[in-house]
Image (cartoon, rainbow, N blue to C red):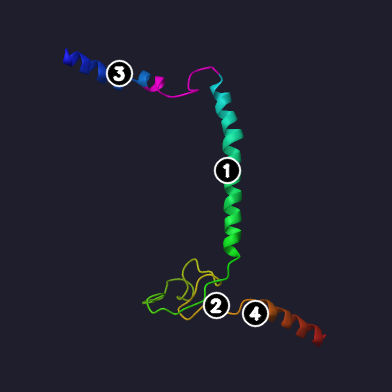
């Protein structure tokens, strides 16, 4: 008796029809299940993705509006025991001069100096003409 019950339970656990019956709402044939999932994708998923993108963009813009952290030369940071195998050997592979400091400080310490320097060169060229 117990073996018959166990056989029935095991048989029902490993059949494909059990998976078909437990697939959930809208999984049957016909009954507009494709239309339902298409509508959910268009009217629920797409707006949710758009709202998430907008939220991420606003958060990133707010993050970028903060000033850069002041450079403090801690001894345990930016230790170079051997040079990197690319470039001048001092910069990481994805180095950004504004956000990533070198062992002796940021490359563009004075914000806006590059812009002023370019303007001065243009003025000098105009004076020469």
**Image: 4 above or below 82:** above
Q: CA distance from mark 3 to mark 1?
A: 40 Å
Q: Secondary structure at mark 3?
A: helix
At a point 26% along the width and 19% down the height, the residue shown is 9
Identify the residue at the far right of this view.
Answer: 129
How far is the residue under mark 4 from the one under mark 2?
11 Å
Q: Could you classify mark 1 by the number of other residues whose Cα lies within 10 Å: few (under 14), some (14-19), or many (20 or more)?
A: few
Residue pointed to by mark 3: 12
82 in relation to 65, above or below: below
Q: CA separation, marks 4 and 1?
A: 40 Å
Side (left or right) of 10 relative to 35 = left
Left or right for 4, reference 12: left
Q: Is residue 21 magenta?
A: yes
Residue 106: image tag: none
Name the quarter where the C terminus is drawn: bottom right
Give the quarter of the image for residue 125. Answer: bottom right
> Which region of the structure is painted magenta?
19-31
Q: Nearer the viewer, mark 3 or mark 2?
A: 3
Please indicate whether residue 103 sits to the left or right of residue 114 in the image.
left
According to the picture, the residue beneath numbered tag 4 turns out to be 113
SS state under label 4: helix
Q: CA distance from mark 3 to mark 4?
A: 75 Å
Q: Nearer the viewer, mark 2 or mark 1?
A: 1
- Is 43 within the magenta? no
- The secondary structure type at the circle numbered 2 is loop
Q: Indicate which disc, 3 or 1, sits on the residue closer to the N terminus.
A: 3
What residue is disc 2 on?
107
Residue 2, position as x, y percentages in the image: 17, 15
Gap between marks 2 and 1 measured at Cα:
38 Å
Kindly identify which residue carries mark 1.
49
């Amino acid at each position: 008796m117990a073996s018959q019950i166990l056989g029935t339970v095991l048989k029902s656990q490993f059949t494909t029809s059990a998976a078909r019956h437990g697939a959930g709402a809208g999984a049957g044939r016909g009954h507009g299940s494709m239309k339902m999932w298409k509508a959910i994708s268009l009217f629920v998923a797409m707006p949710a993705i758009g709202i998430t993108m907008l939220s991420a963009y606003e958060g990133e813009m707010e993050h970028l509006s903060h000033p850069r952290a002041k450079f403090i030369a801690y001894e345990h940071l930016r230790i170079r025991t051997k040079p990197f195998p690319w470039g001048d050997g001092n910069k990481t592979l994805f180095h950004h001069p504004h956000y990533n400091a070198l062992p002796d400080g940021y490359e563009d310490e004075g914000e806006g100096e590059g812009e002023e320097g370019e303007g001065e060169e243009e003025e000098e060229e105009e004076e020469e003409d």
